[in-house]
Image: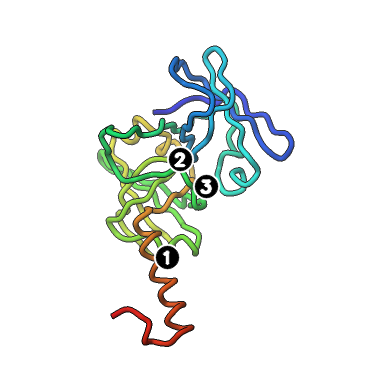
Amino acid sequence: MTLRVVDAADGGGGRRLTLAADWTDVRRGQSIAVNGCCLTVCQIEAGTIGFDVVPETLRKTNLGLLQVGDEVNVERSLRIGDPLDGHFVQGHVDGRAVLIESKSWGEESRLRLQAPADLAQYLVPEGSVALDGVSLTIASIQGNNFEVALIPTTLRLTTLGQKTSGWPFNLEADILSKTIVSWLERQRKADDHYGSGSGLA
């Protein structure tokens, strides 16, 4: 779902981000993903919830670009026992993928984006990726560029179809890809250090 930004106050290197929300069961200290970034509720007032965004988060995400009136994708934390749709999204943004172009034909839309070089290694065809908190399947990859397909439901329920070229989507790579690639990299470094005898069978 989406919520609207009603205040974005910068100060002390951080930012207080306030969203319009009529949720009655939210408590301070709860985690809510905003554009795919896990944030902690720090303020609750009538019809609004507020989050403090620290400098590191502002550096890695697009939350510092948000203005009053912007819509953001929000998702509350999954509870144990709840049905799981899509893939595991932790809310730990890895970096930003810049929108190169969007195109539509019939009921399908596609976004073509450029991932940072250090994150492109985690992208695989038909694999999963999260953009601004939305779980998507990678349709194609060429170098550091990749495409995702958006169905009408995704366009209706999220902000993805509203963005124009140059928008830096918050990118969270699939945790399985990150785990496998990181393990293989550590194994390769161990082989280089100790010799091929300690490598993979």
Residue found at the far right of this picture: 12
Above or below residue 195? Residue 8 is above
Expressed as whole percent of the image width and height from the top left, the position of residue 151 reads: 28, 39
Q: Which residue is mark 2?
A: 36
Spatial distance from mark 3 to mark 2, Cα to Cα? Answer: 13 Å
Residue found at the far top of this picture: 46
Above or below residue 11? Residue 108 is below
- Give the amino acid type for the residue marked by disc 3 in the picture: Pro
Name the mark on residue 168: 3
Badge 1 density bin: few <14, some 14–19, many ≥20, Cα 10 Å: few
Expressed as whole percent of the image width and height from the top left, the position of residue 110 reads: 34, 47
Left or right: 53 with respect to 105? right
Q: Nearer the viewer, mark 2 or mark 1?
A: 1
* Mark nearer the N terminus (3 vs 2): 2
Placement of the N terminus among the 4 image quadrants: top left
Left or right: 91 with respect to 176? right
Spatial distance from mark 2 to mark 1, Cα to Cα? Answer: 22 Å
- Give the amino acid type for the residue marked by disc 2 in the picture: Gly
Q: Which residue is mark 1?
A: 182
Q: Nearer the viewer, mark 3 or mark 2?
A: 2
Q: Nearer the viewer, residue 23 or 190?
A: 190
For the residues bearing labels 2 and 1, Cβ distance under 8 angstroms:
no
Badge 2 density bin: few <14, some 14–19, many ≥20, Cα 10 Å: many
Expressed as whole percent of the image width and height from the top left, the position of residue 198 reads: 38, 82
- Give the amino acid type for the residue marked by disc 1 in the picture: Ser
* Mark nearer the N terminus (2 vs 1): 2
Q: Residue at x 55, y 26 (%)?
A: 5
Secondary structure type for disc 1: helix
